[in-house]
Image: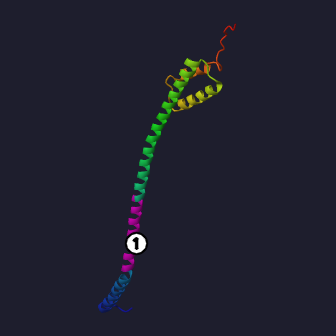
C-alpha cells in the first residue's frame, strides 16, 4: 500500500471541503426558502387561529346577550300568564259563577305552561277553583205569574 503523503491528504481534504462548500452554496438558498415557507405557514396559522378565537368570542358574547333577552321574555310571558289566570278567576269565579269547558281547557293549558316555566304562586288554587265551577250559569227559578 502506498502511503499517503501530507500533500495528498491536504489535496483530498481541500477537494472535500470545496465539494461541501459548493453544495452549501446550492443547498443554502433551498434551505432558507424552506424555512421561510415554514415560518410563513406558521404565521398564517397563528393569524387564522387568532381570527377564529375572536370570531368565537363574538359569537359567545352574542349568545350571552340573547340568553338574557330570552330570560327576560320568559319572565314577561309568565307575568302575562299569571295576570290572565287572575283575570279569568275574577271574571268567571267572582262575576259569573261559571266557566265553560272551552275556557277551562284554555286556562288549564295556560297554567301548565306557567307551571313548566317554574312558577306557581297562588295559581294552582285559583285553577282548581276555576275547574270546579259549573259549565253553565245557574238557572234562577223565579216565579212567573
Q: Nearer the viewer, residue 113 or 91?
A: 91
Q: Is residue 67 left or right of residue 21?
A: right
Q: Secondary structure at mark 1?
A: helix
- The answer to which quarter of the image holds residue 137 is top right
Q: Is residue 128 visible?
A: no
User: In the rendering, at what x and y percent does residue 73 appear?
Assistant: 47, 38
Q: Nearer the viewer, residue 140 or 36?
A: 140
Rendered residue at 45%/44% (across/down): 66
Rendered residue at 53%/28% (across/down): 84
The colouring scheme, among rainbow, by chain, secondary structure or one colour, is rainbow
Q: Nearer the viewer, residue 74 or 57?
A: 74
Q: Is residue 73 left or right of residue 35?
A: right
How many numbered tags mark residues here? 1
User: In the rendering, at what x and y percent does residue 123 appear?
Assistant: 52, 24
Residue numbers of the magenta segment: 28-50
Residue under numbered circle 1: 37
What secondary structure do most residues of the magenta stretch adopt? helix
Q: Is residue 120 left or right of residue 98?
A: left
Rendered residue at 41%/63% (across/down): 45
Q: Quadrant of the N terminus?
A: bottom left
User: In the rendering, at what x and y percent does residue 110 appear?
Assistant: 57, 30
Q: Nearer the viewer, residue 64 or 52?
A: 64
Q: Quadrant of the C terminus?
A: top right
Residue 43 highlighted magenta (yes or no)? yes
User: In the rendering, at what x and y percent does residue 90 appear?
Assistant: 53, 21
Rendered residue at 43%/41% (across/down): 68
Dot 1 alpha-carbon crowd within 10 angstroms: few under 14, some 14 to 19, many 20 or more: few
Residue 91 highlighted magenta (yes or no)? no
- The answer to which quarter of the image holds residue 23 is bottom left
Q: Is residue 117 visible?
A: yes
Amino acid at each position: 500500500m502506498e502511503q499517503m503523503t501530507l500533500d495528498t491528504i491536504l489535496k483530498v481534504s481541500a477537494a472535500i471541503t470545496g465539494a461541501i462548500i459548493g453544495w452549501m452554496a446550492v443547498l443554502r438558498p433551498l434551505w432558507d426558502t424552506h424555512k421561510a415557507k415554514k415560518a410563513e405557514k406558521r404565521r398564517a396559522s397563528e393569524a387564522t387561529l387568532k381570527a377564529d378565537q375572536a370570531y368565537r368570542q363574538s359569537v359567545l358574547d352574542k349568545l350571552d346577550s340573547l340568553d338574557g333577552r330570552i330570560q327576560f321574555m320568559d319572565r314577561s310571558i309568565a307575568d302575562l300568564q299569571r295576570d290572565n289566570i287572575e283575570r279569568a278567576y275574577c271574571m268567571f269565579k267572582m262575576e259569573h259563577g261559571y266557566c265553560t269547558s272551552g275556557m277551562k281547557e284554555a286556562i288549564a293549558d295556560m297554567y301548565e305552561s306557567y307551571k313548566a316555566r317554574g312558577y306557581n304562586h297562588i295559581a294552582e288554587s285559583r285553577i282548581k277553583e276555576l275547574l270546579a265551577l259549573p259549565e253553565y250559569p245557574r238557572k234562577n227559578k223565579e216565579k212567573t205569574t
